[in-house]
Image (spheres, rainbow, N blue to C red):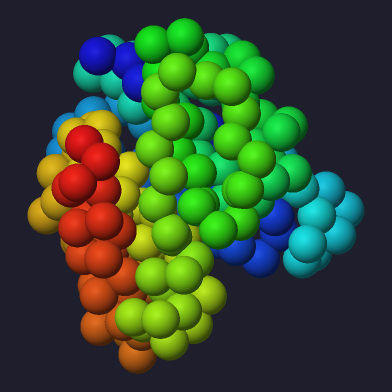
């Protein structure tokens, strides 16, 4: 059941936090999970990616070789990180921030950042909107597990807003799944 996921964007968009939360949800469900990350020297605005491998069996190599899913939250991330995507995989793009869609057969476009801004009030929640969408699109963990992992990871005063963001992503992906 091995699934390899690459979440990418720019520094400050929270793709690393989203990957950590996803890995924690998988572990909570009794699965094996590893998470790694890389980012440019810039704290915000530089290229950023985080990878997660989830499996029912032990994981001996902690780096994604051929991702089954790539999330791209910016055009730069889409251009840089989709090329080694499994041909049967899924490319998930932030609709407004990735206007030039890569030539890939399985693309899902969701207005991730727009939903975060218009419905939750800040772009800060885009990573959690994306997480809700990814869980819906892949079924890699249950919605209950991802809700619990988000609640355990975010600051207590933001739990309600993060739950709203998670549900927005879940619902936005329903029509795409």
The furthest residue to the bottom: 157
Q: How many marks?
A: 0
Q: Nearer the viewer, residue 144 or 34?
A: 144
Say which residue appears at 85% left-offset and 59% top-offset: 42
- Quarter holding the C terminus is top left
- Residue 78: image quadrant is top right
Give percent across and percent down for residue 140.
24, 33
Inspect this view and state whether residue 79 appears. Answer: yes
Please state if 129 lies on the left or on the right of 81 as rendered: left
Give percent across and percent down for residue 45.
78, 62
Say which residue appears at 19% left-offset and 58% top-offset: 171
Give percent across and percent down for residue 146.
23, 53
In the displayed structure, 34 sits above or below 84; it is below
The furthest residue to the right: 41
- Residue 85: image quadrant is top right
Inspect this view and state whether residue 25 appears. Answer: no
Q: Nearer the viewer, residue 46 or 31?
A: 46
- Residue 105: image quadrant is top left
In the displayed structure, 125 sits above or below 27; it is below
Please state if 42 lies on the left or on the right of 125 as rendered: right
- Quarter holding the N terminus is top left
Say which residue appears at 52% left-offset and 20% top-offset: 104
In the displayed structure, 96 sits above or below 118; it is above
Give percent across and percent down for residue 14.
55, 61
In the displayed structure, 36 sits above or below 58; it is below
Say which residue appears at 73% left-offset and 32% top-offset: 80
């Amino acid at each position: 059941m091995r699934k390899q996921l690459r979440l990418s964007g720019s520094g400050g968009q929270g793709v690393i936090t989203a990957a950590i939360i996803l890995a924690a949800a998988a572990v909570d469900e009794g699965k094996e999970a590893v998470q790694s990350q890389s980012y440019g020297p810039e704290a915000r605005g530089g290229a950023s990616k985080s990878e997660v491998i989830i499996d029912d069996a032990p994981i001996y190599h902690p780096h994604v070789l051929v991702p089954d899913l790539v999330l791209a939250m910016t055009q730069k991330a889409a251009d840089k990180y989709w090329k080694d995507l499994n041909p049967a995989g899924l490319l998930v793009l932030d609709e407004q921030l990735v206007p030039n869609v890569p030539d890939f057969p399985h693309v899902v476009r969701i207005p991730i950042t727009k939903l975060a801004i218009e419905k939750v009030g800040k772009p800060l929640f885009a990573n959690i909107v994306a997480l809700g969408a990814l869980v819906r699109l892949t079924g890699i963990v249950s919605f209950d597990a991802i809700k619990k992992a988000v609640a355990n990871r975010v600051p207590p005063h933001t739990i309600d807003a993060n739950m709203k963001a998670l549900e927005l992503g879940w619902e936005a992906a329903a029509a795409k799944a």
